[in-house]
Amino acid sequence: MERNVTSPEAGIRTSSEMVRSLVYTSVATRPFSDAELDALLEQARSRNAALQVTGMLSYRNGSFVQFLEGSEEHLAELMTDISADSRHTDVRVLIDEPIAERQFSSWTMGYQRMRTSGKPVPIGFRDTFTDLEQGADDATTARAARELALWFKVRSTS
Amino acid sequence: MSVSTNRLAGAITWARIEDDFFVGSRDGEFLGFIDVEESGLYVVCDQFSRPIGQYSELDGAMAALRDASNAAFDESGVA
């Protein structure tokens, strides 16, 4: 059976607006508990729904990677707020580009907990999250972003 | 003279997203992924998320994805 990695719910529908995709990393100013992450997600989902912004958040060992999709105006507004949020620092935009369609149309802010036990990365493998954290070259960043988006969709539907 | 197009396929970049989820890509093109099920088996899915096999070891799963992508490359010139 095919493993369905499409969106599970009806999501935000946008007309012919120009949509951009923005991916950024940041560092938590202190470790987030599960309850704090839940609160952050709830706040983000409410704000994003109002702005017709969709996306996904991932968090590992004090670092965030966030995907946002929306109009240029709404993303700029959002990034102003995000940059001023004292819960994180070192906000770095990795990707900011126009897209033909949203990848996360069903999620105002999707989230999947990463299963990481501290096991070393197998020899010969890259670590996707580290590639994004370190802001490598454009090709590496683009590949790692695609990998993380794919992982999220698989985990969200399995 | 026939030439195996496999020889022209670039190297696969392997990446780990979390403990039990791996992705293969070549020249920026997504080839497929390997997901570890609760049973401990490594399930290999192609670029269309279609399962193509289950393996007890990561090496076997990687070889299966490599073979599948090479076969696709031979057919179309695109992995």
Image: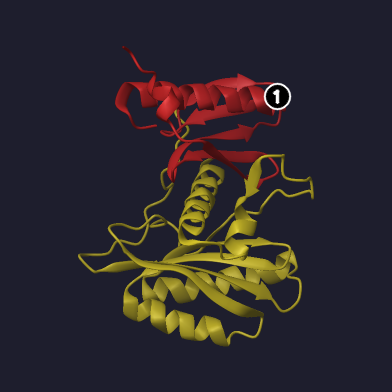
Chain colours: A yellow, B red
What residue is drawn where x is 64% and y is 58%? A130
What residue is drawn where x is 61% and y is 34%? B35
Q: Quadrant of the N terminus of chain B?
A: top left
Q: Quadrant of the C terminus of chain B?
A: top left
Give x and y (percent) for residue B11: 51, 36
Q: Where on the picture, by quarter, is residue A61?
A: bottom right
Label 1: which residue? B57
Mark 1, other Cα within 10 Å: few <14 / some 14–19 / many ≥20: few
What residue is drawn where x is 37% and y is 53%? A10
Question: Which of the chains bears the disc numbered 1?
Answer: B
- Residue sticking out furthest to the top: B1
Most foreground residue, B34 or B38: B34
Q: Is residue A1 visible?
A: no
In this picture, residue A40 sits left or right of residue B73: right
Give x and y (percent) for residue A116: 73, 50
Q: Where on the picture, by quarter, is residue B63?
A: top right
Give x and y (percent) for residue B26: 46, 39
Q: Secondary structure at mark 1?
A: loop
- Residue sticking out furthest to the left: A16
- Residue sticking out furthest to the front: B1
Q: Is residue B30 visible?
A: yes
Amino acid of disc 1: Glu
Give x and y (percent) for residue A75: 40, 76
Q: Where on the picture, by quarter, is residue A132?
A: bottom right
Does B56 appear above or below A46?
A: above
In this picture, residue A135 sits left or right of residue A10: right
Most foreground residue, B71 or A110: B71
What residue is drawn where x is 53% and y is 66%? A66
Q: How many marks?
A: 1
Does A142 appear above or below B5?
A: below
In this picture, residue B61 sits left or right of residue B76: right
